[in-house]
Image (cartoon, rainbow, N blue to C red):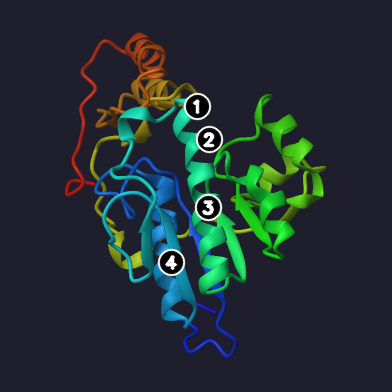
Amino acid sequence: MSGTELVTNAADPLRIVLVAPPYLDIPPKGYGGTEAVVADLADALVQRGHDVTVLGAGEPRTSARLIPVWERTLADRLGEPYPEIMHALKVRRVIERIATTDGVDIVHDHTFAGPLNTPAYSAVGIPMVVTVHGPIDDDLYPYYRVLGDEVGLIAISDRQRELAPDLNWVGRVHNALCIDEWPFRADKGDYALFLGRYAPYKGAHLALRAAHQAGIPRCSRANAMSPRNRPISMSRCARCSPRMIRSVDKSTR
């Protein structure tokens, strides 16, 4: 099937709950890779005839039903432990309610703490899969390892699976793009663009160093979230080159 083809009118529609992080709108107004993926997935599933509910925060901006479990988005608290744990608890209560009133066929979680709800869902017969959006580092490997076979993990790349082959991977789904929103342009600009937030594992300092060594003017779009990581990452980027690191808005991207 090509990227422009869609399967519509599902013969056996599913009642799907997508769990997004609580930090940004779905889709985000600017930065927000996970939220963008969840939004595209929600729209595609609805178009294919499934009954889709999204749990997160912010305003409804997809064709799926959004149930916000917070009064506002929590971008200013990204990286803190409390929102992660509290979000998982809030989501569990909402899913238990939906299961009682409307029924749930599967939960697809895109958060860090969400897998901890697996025993509660299993107790009422609801399967859950979790897309692992980040790298499997020294902290995350034992976390997912302890979860065992109760949680089906979805990788976003083959390399991610290769680095932790003994985890309970049930599939690999690359993060997709809506091609119409990212048109191809043969005439390239003379700059390098880093799209992401300044967190050490994102590698902004490596991108800037490579651009500097190649003599390419840089146009770097960084996000102002995650204050805990920002000083470290900014200092690394500053050491790569004394030249200005500029930001670009969504329309420029």
Hey, which quadrant is residue 31 in on the image? top left
Find disc 2 in the rendering and name its residue. Answer: 85
Q: Is residue 89 visible?
A: yes
- The earlier-in-sequence mark between 4 and 3 is 4
- The earlier-in-sequence mark between 4 and 1 is 4
Q: Are marks 1 and 2 in contact (CB under 8 Å)?
A: yes
Q: Who's the residue at 26% across and 48% down the image?
A: 188
Find disc 1 in the rendering and name its residue. Answer: 81
The answer for how far apart the CA atoms under marks 4 and 3 are is: 21 Å
Hey, which quadrant is residue 205 in on the image? top left
Q: Who's the residue at 52% across and 62% down the image?
A: 97
Residue closer to the observer: 110 or 125: 125
In the rendered view of the protein, which quadrant contains the N terminus? bottom right
Disc 3 or disc 1, which is closer to the eye? 3
Find disc 4 in the rendering and name its residue. Answer: 42
Residue closer to the observer: 136 or 51: 51
128 shown above or below 7: above
135 shown above or below 139: below
- The earlier-in-sequence mark between 2 and 3 is 2
The answer for how far apart the CA atoms under marks 3 and 1 are is: 19 Å
- Mark 1 surroundings within 10 Å by alpha-carbon count, few (fewer than 14), some (14 through 19), many (20 or more): few
Find disc 3 in the rendering and name its residue. Answer: 93
The answer for how far apart the CA atoms under marks 2 and 3 are is: 13 Å
